[in-house]
Image: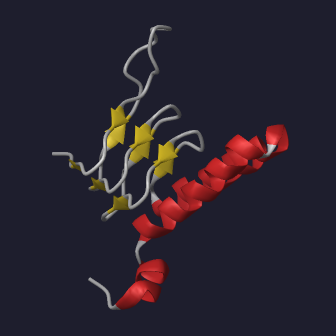
Amino acid sequence: ATEGLLGAYLFFKGVQAVACARVSHHYWTERGEAGRLIARLLQSQTADVFGVDIHPGCRLGHGVTIDHATGVTLGETCVIGDNVYIMHDVTLGATGTSSEHDRHPKVGSNVFLGAK
């Protein structure tokens, strides 16, 4: 636990990874091909530094929290709703190659995700 927002932003890698994911998603969706390159670079650095792999195409709702963070992987077409709490080692990866559906899971709002 920490005291205050500043401590969370400075010391919680889950908070930092979500912030980086939001910036990379902006570049992925709003800045064309050059933006996609920047988004991939930011995502790669985030994965190296924090041990969290969030594809820039992943859509995150409001209030998403990644606790302990290490080992979390969220794929390109993954959608995370509002107020979702994700524990370490959760992977929302590809569910197949069918062209009839997106490849990654969709998570509603007010959900707790953990891995064993």
Q: Quadrant of residue 104?
A: top left
Q: Position of residue 93 (x, y in %)?
A: 40, 32
- Tell which of 87 and 107 is nearer to you: 107
- In-front residue for pair 28/30: 30
Q: How many marks?
A: 0
Q: Position of residue 40 (x, y in %)?
A: 68, 45
Q: Quadrant of the C terminus?
A: top left
Q: Quadrant of the N terminus?
A: bottom left
Residue 2: which quarter of the image? bottom left
Residue drawn at x 31%, y 65% as measured from the top left: 68
Res 57 quadrant in image: top right
Q: In this figure, which colouring scheme has been used for the structure?
A: secondary structure
Q: Residue at x 33, y 91 (%)?
A: 3
What is the x, y in percent for residue 38? 75, 50
Farthest residue to the bottom: give it.
Answer: 3
Residue appearing at x 69%, y 41% in the figure? 29
Residue 28 on image: x %, y %: 69, 43
**Residue placed farthest to the left in the image?**
116
Determine the residue positioned at 67% across, 51% down: 26
Viewed as shown, does residue 42 lie left or right of 116? right
Q: Is 79 placed above or below 94 here?
A: below
